[in-house]
Image (tube, helix red, strand yellow):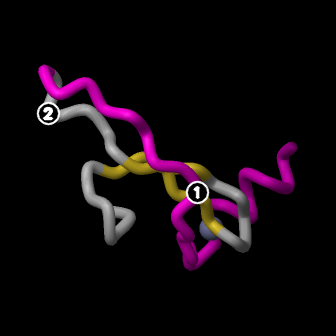
């Protein structure tokens, strides 16, 4: 677990699209996609379809 945190802190993240979230059309600001780093497995959310941030 601690190793994961250290890994994540020094990782040059290489995000890959992990999941497309079904967004409620009322809340346009909600995240649309979920991305996962191949190296440290960190997961982030994005409002874009084609890039992680
Ligand atoms: Zn990473």
Per the rendering, the mark at residue 18 is: 1
Q: Residue at x 56, y 70 (%)?
A: 16
Check the image and report above or below for 36 versus 28.
Answer: below
Q: Is residue 48 magenta?
A: no
Q: Nearer the viewer, residue 14 or 22?
A: 22
**Is residue 5 shown left or right of residue 12?**
right
Answer with the quarter of the image where residue 48 lies: bottom left
- Ligand 1 is located in which of the four quadrants? bottom right
Check the image and report above or below for 52 versus 22.
Answer: below
- Give the SS element for disc 2: loop
Q: Is residue 12 magenta?
A: yes
Q: Residue at x 43, y 39 (%)?
A: 21
Say whether disc 1 or disc 2 marks the residue closer to the N-terminus. 1
**Is residue 21 shown left or right of residue 43?**
left
Say few, some or many: other residues with alpha carbon within 10 Å of mark 2 (under 14 / 14 to 19 / 20 or more). few
Q: Residue at x 41, y 50 (%)?
A: 33
Image location of residue 14, percent across then percent down: 57, 77
Marks 1 and 2 sit apart, C-alpha to C-alpha, by 20 Å
Say few, some or many: other residues with alpha carbon within 10 Å of mark 1 (under 14 / 14 to 19 / 20 or more). some
Give the residue number, with chain letter if any, for mark 2: 28
Q: Which span is picked out in magenta? A: 1-26
């Amino acid at each position: 677990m601690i190793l994961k945190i250290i890994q994540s802190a020094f990782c040059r993240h290489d995000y890959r699209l992990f999941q497309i979230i079904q967004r409620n059309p009322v809340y346009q600001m909600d995240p649309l996609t979920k991305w996962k780093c191949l190296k440290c497995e960190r997961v982030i959310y994005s409002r874009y379809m084609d890039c992680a941030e």
